[in-house]
């Protein structure tokens, strides 16, 4: 088996900077974690907020702190730094080779999707953003690492795509269509982003970030690879 990650990310229309921050970090005992935060407000002020959250989480994960504890600590830190006046959503996807599980940590009112053997489940248990109050706890879901497991996390810009014209993006239905086409994680991230951009007429009403993590058939050598594309205006 191998893990593949696909990411698609775009700023709010006419905004010079995205309020979403995303990082990938290797875990000290093996595996890796993807951390996505969406700061309140927009532009540079939102970026500062999401950066605070992500930096705190990845520093703790790098020290071997468990995901749930890292999320709670980041929430308390943001609350202390900003006096509870700002908030941020937070999603952590971790391939934990110690427990041999995919650990899904969510402080985000927006749901997440998990797919296995062609069946999609929506993770939509009530969840609070971080930074509003002390001891805000995440919703944690664990699944055994096995071939065919796939999870999709996204910021609320994806959920609100089409709002301007009274349309709605059915993320689960779009994901099912992409799974039926045997799309790769990157193709799934791109496909969901493309649909959101269509609904927003190419002018996203909010920052949009989509992360797709999948456990697939191992293909090739033992080399770890990562690629990235950063358009510069």
Image (spheres, helix red, strand yellow):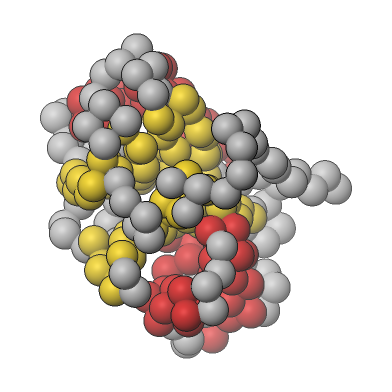
* 171 vs 150, nearest the viewer: 150
Residue 40: which quarter of the image?
A: top left
Residue at image point 57% right, 32% down: 222
Report whether residue 84 is seen.
no
Q: Locate residue 29: give its quadrant.
A: top left
Q: Residue at x 39, y 24 (%)?
A: 30
Q: Which residue lies most toward the bottom here?
A: 166
Q: Position of residue 160 (x, y in %)?
A: 45, 70
Answer left or right for 60 relative to 212.
Answer: left
Q: Residue at x 43, y 31 (%)?
A: 32
Q: How many discs appear?
A: 0
**Residue 123, quarter of picture:** bottom left
Where 50 falls versus 211 (above or below)? above
Rendered residue at 46%/74% (across/down): 179
Q: Residue furthest front?
A: 220
Question: With 231 as the anchor, is 155 left or right in this view?
Answer: left
Residue 223 in percent (x, y) is at 62, 32
Looking at the image, the residue that sits furthest to the top is 63
- On screen, residue 10 versus residue 57, left or right, reads right
């Amino acid at each position: 088996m191998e893990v593949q990650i696909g990411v698609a990310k775009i700023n709010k229309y006419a905004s010079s900077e995205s309020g979403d921050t995303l990082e990938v970090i290797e875990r000290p005992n093996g595996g890796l974690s993807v951390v996505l935060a969406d700061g309140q407000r927009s532009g540079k002020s939102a970026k500062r907020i999401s950066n605070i959250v992500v930096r705190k989480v990845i520093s703790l994960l790098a020290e071997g702190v468990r995901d749930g504890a890292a999320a709670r600590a980041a929430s308390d830190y943001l609350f202390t730094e900003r006096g509870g006046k700002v908030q941020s959503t937070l999603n952590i996807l971790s391939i934990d080779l110690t427990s041999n599980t995919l650990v899904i940590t969510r402080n985000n009112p927006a749901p997440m999707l998990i797919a296995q053997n062609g069946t999609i489940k929506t993770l939509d248990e009530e969840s609070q953003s971080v930074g509003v109050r002390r001891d805000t706890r995440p919703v944690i879901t664990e699944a055994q690492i096995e071939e065919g497991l796939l999870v999709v996390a996204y910021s609320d810009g994806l959920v609100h795509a089409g709002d301007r014209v009274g349309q709605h993006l059915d993320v689960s239905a779009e994901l099912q269509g992409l799974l039926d086409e045997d799309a790769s994680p990157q193709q799934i991230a791109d496909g969901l982003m493309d649909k959101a951009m269509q609904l927003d007429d190419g002018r996203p009403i909010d920052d949009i970030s989509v992360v797709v993590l999948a456990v697939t058939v191992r293909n090739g050598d033992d080399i770890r690879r990562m690629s990235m594309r950063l358009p510069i205006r």
